[in-house]
Amino acid sequence: MHALLALNPAYWQTTTLKLVVILLTVVTGAFILVYGFLFKMMAHMQSRLGPMEAGPHGLLQLMAEFGKFLQKEDIFPSKADRRVFALAPFVVLASTFLVYVVIPAGPRLIVEDFDTGIFFALAMSSLSVLGVLMAGWASANKYSLMGALRAAGQLIAYELPLVLAIVGVVVQAQSLSLQTIVHQQADGAIFGFTGIGTPFILTQFVGFFIFLVAMQAELTQTPFDMPLAESELVAGYLTEYSGIRFLLFFIAEFATAFAFAAIAATLFLGGWYVPGVHGAMADVIGPLALGAKIIGVSFLIFWIRFTYPRFREDQLQTFAWKYLIPLSLINITATGILKVVF
Amino acid sequence: MPKLPGLIKGLGVTFKTMTQKTVTVQYPHEKEALAPRSRGVIALKEENCTVCMLCARQCPDWCIYIEGHKDKAPPRREGGKPRSVQYLDRFDIDYALCMYCGICVEVCPFDALFWSPEYEYSEPSIADLLHDKDKLGEWMATVPDKPALEVGAEAKKGAK
Amino acid sequence: MTVTDHQKSMYIAGQAADARINIELETEGMTLNIGPQHPATHGTLRIVVRLDGEQVVWADPVCGYMHRGYEKLTEVRTYPQITTLVNRIDWLSSFANEVPFILAAEQLMGIDAPPRAQWIRTILFEMARIANITLFLGEMGAQLGAITPVFYAFRDREHVLNLIESATGGRFHPNYDRIGGLKDDLPKGWVDECKDVMHRVRDFCDELETLLMGNEIFAQRMRGIGVIPAQVGLDYGLSGANIRASGVDWDIRRDEDSPLAWKHCDWKVWTHVDGDSYARYWVRLQETREASKIVDQLLDGLPAGPIMAKVPRIIKVPAGEAWVHTENPLGEMGYYVVSQGGLGPFRCKIRSASFNNVSIVPWLLQGVYVPDIITILSSLYFILGDIDR
């Protein structure tokens, strides 16, 4: 990272810079997704305009919402475990931040290039389950607890297809490091044609599909949002949260969506690689290319969210265990065989 | 395993709607024109009112308050008797109670009440929703002409 | 289904148990109150549900939160005033509430409205059906999590409401029917505009068929849920699409002789054999399409003529009793009007469709899983104003 600037800053300076970059990325990513997709795309799909009053075409709507949440009363249920209650949103947010550490935005634009990059990312994203359970438990409300348990069950059930879908990519790229995976896609050739490299979506289309579905479930988006929708009937795990704490959960949700879309873009669509751009230019074009691919994947996520009704809890679990996991196992086997053969 | 086609076709519907124009009318910057018969507010033509009290009696909510008095007016022709005429002192409609049913407008035998499509008269205080005689007279300016009737309709004799 | 004494004492004991500090997790005998304010019930309906883990042991709907005393009101109002009030019973199918009442009064007076009035009444009746059921088609998806169809429903329904407004003056409460005919004739250009709107309604039905009914997730959530056998439905007095979805071929428009113009057009009664929530949705979608076809045929053949029969200025309905029922969008609605020759009725009994439709809820919700409660309640489609009057 410091080679980029031809300076030699101290370790603490680079670390601070990386922290600031992640912070800005998280917030910007959440903002883009919320404004572009949740406000505007959803509105146009529903034949309406969305927010138009706050700022030109409603660009400042999020500022208004932020202000609204800030000025709300900070409520604790009387029997709640105060420390756990306060800590839960930060646990979820922390797990989101940690995922951004390994996502490459350019050949040298990565916070830390772990050898076990993707494994680290998935492990960190699983930590959000802890936050959900903490939220449900600390609310001192048996309905919240049940909602949290259901949510945790769903998140854990869909972790497996998520991981297994990625194993196919890892087998094909022969590495867990995200930077290496991007390079493999950049340098590959399709039957001798090296023009666009080999985005893994071409060979791992089954894996991509499974990853998208599992990602939808990990984000508790429709059609997998029974834990949140359950609050119509029994209280969901977020019921006792209001004000800025609720906003933290909300930001975490959309920042995680951004992160997962980035991972999908990196694993399947080639990440920051644009055909024909190498070297220092790639450091400039790379983030933009990655951003465009993230928008594309997010479009799919939100398109599905706004169109479909939701699964019932047991149908959701059946879908994961009986359909997605066997499918992903078949995918891995096929990938392994083909990798050895070719 | 769910078949894909039904799910995919549904996605197509939402995508198509996204590309089409939205139907939102951005009130208060743009306003839609209402039909001339829309029941927005009731206007009073004071010269026609003879204080017969039919509207106040027929109102299901009793939201019309009328007070009048009888007095002598000069005769129409020279050398005649003075006529006794009803003068309208107070004619209030309480729009906080009004159901917008239109029975008063329909029942008035002297064409003193009219419907107008005006709807932007909300007030911060409920007491201001009591429109008095003068305010009701102001609404007369917004009363549209009667719309032409459809093919096959018979014009009512002495139509209101 | 009556609640036994044992169940009552268990309920009280359960309430007492729940009143303790409930940090320990009990999954047995949990009482859930789907309270009067709830996004899933269409208004202020309260359903007390006793759960055993995930399943419902018994359910008890508590109505009355919206009781406005209609039948008492009708005793002290005149006929034109009651026509206005009655619009608000089932507020979505506005015009359809006035019709049976006016027909009952006309029956007592021995007056027939002229044919043009009857045809326009039928047109508006079917348009009220379209306005009502399109809302159901949209919000059924919303109850299941599909947030988009609601907006399509409101967008296309807006045109129907605008048409009703241009003819009657009110979108939701037309107050247009009079004893002896209608208040006014239609404004110029209404017929052509109406045909355009009916076109749009049919497009909307097609769109929803693709978006919701063709969706496998929707089908999985709705098929086999809340099955009502035909005999049970008839015992509970269900009517409308609820009973037609269970295979009972009964439609008052076709089966009874009414002065309105249904017999003058060619239309079909839709039934389904399954009796589950999907069947109810399917039947209502087909009925909306059928209603738009009825309106088209009626518009083509609309007779010319007067809109009002000869009635005296002050209407006094002669003494007698009359019962008139019609196939309202929600089901069978009827008025039993007892007149003693005054300006208003002596007594008016209102039979509303939703009151009977909701009476099957205790029977229907037994053994059902918690997420399916909302699906079943929504598929029965009751309006609170109709239940409580």
Image (cartoon, coloured by chain):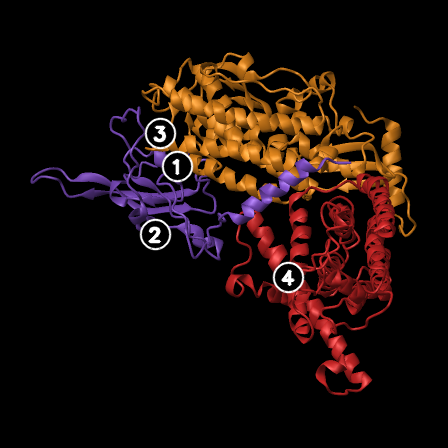
Q: Is residue B47 left or right of residue B11?
A: left
Alpha-carbon span between mark 2 and mark 3? 27 Å
The residue to which callout 3 is attached is C184
The residue to which callout 1 is attached is C166
User: Which tint was used for chain A?
Assistant: red
Image quadrant in which you'd find residue A134 = bottom right
Alpha-carbon span between mark 4 and mark 1? 49 Å
Q: Which chain is orange in the picture?
A: C
State the SS at label 2: helix
User: Which tint was used for chain B?
Assistant: purple
Task: Give the residue at x 82% y 84%.
Answer: A11
Check disc 3 and give the amino acid type.
Answer: Asp
Check disc 1 and give the amino acid type.
Answer: Ser
State the SS at label 1: helix
Alpha-carbon span between mark 2 and mark 1? 26 Å
Residues behind callouts 2 and 3 on a single chain: no
